[in-house]
Image (cartoon, helix red, strand yellow):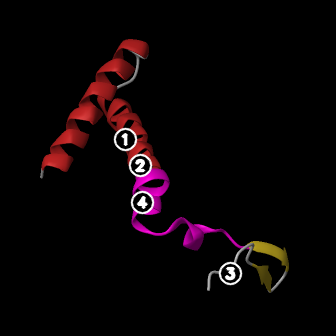
Amino acid sequence: MAMHALWVREHNRIVKILHLLNPFYDDEKLYQEGRRIVGAMIQHITYNEWLPALIPSLTLVRPMIVERNVIIYPFFPH
């Protein structure tokens, strides 16, 4: 519950700033833009900070696709 309240407050803070920068935005536009920004923040924290700490970094190596149906992994963990 505490994390939800934190993100709701962050959304409201961002919406206030957006309203100052874009006074012509209606309530729905402000809400959706704030929602988009907070969603991006959550994704950034999840994929760049939380998951790498949770999962060993070597398993997060992305495969390289050389040609159709051929996948090469830069590192194959033992």
Residue on which the image places disc 2: 45
Question: Which residue is nearer to you in this view: 17 or 55?
Answer: 55
Instruction: Name the amino acid, label 4.
Output: Ala
Residue on which the image places disc 3: 76
| Quadrant hosting residue 76 | bottom right
Q: Is residue 33 above or below residue 68?
A: above
Q: Main secondary structure of the magenta part?
A: helix
Contact, CB < 8 Å: mark 4 with mark 3?
no
Q: What is the spatial separation of the Cα atoms under label 1 and label 4, in whole angstroms? A: 21 Å
Q: Marks 1 and 4: which is nearer the front?
A: 4
* Upstream in sequence: badge 3 or badge 1: 1
Q: Marks 2 and 4: which is nearer the front?
A: 4
* Upstream in sequence: badge 1 or badge 4: 1
Residue on which the image places disc 1: 38
Farthest residue toward the left?
A: 1
What is the magenta range? 46-63
Q: Marks 3 and 1: which is nearer the front?
A: 3
| Quadrant hosting residue 30 | top left
* Upstream in sequence: badge 1 or badge 2: 1
* Upstream in sequence: badge 2 or badge 4: 2
Number of other residues with Cα within 10 Å of mark 4, as a class: few under 14, some 14 to 19, many 20 or more:
few
Instruction: Name the amino acid, label 2.
Output: Ile
Residue 20's spot in the image, x, y percent?
36, 13
* Upstream in sequence: badge 4 or badge 3: 4
Number of other residues with Cα within 10 Å of mark 1, as a class: few under 14, some 14 to 19, many 20 or more:
some
Q: Secondary structure at mark 2?
A: helix
Q: What is the spatial separation of the Cα atoms under label 2 and label 4, in whole angstroms? A: 11 Å
Residue 41's spot in the image, x, y percent?
41, 43
Instruction: Name the amino acid, label 1.
Output: Val
Contact, CB < 8 Å: mark 1 with mark 4?
no
Looking at the image, residue 56 sits to the left or right of residue 4; the answer is right
Q: Secondary structure at mark 3?
A: loop
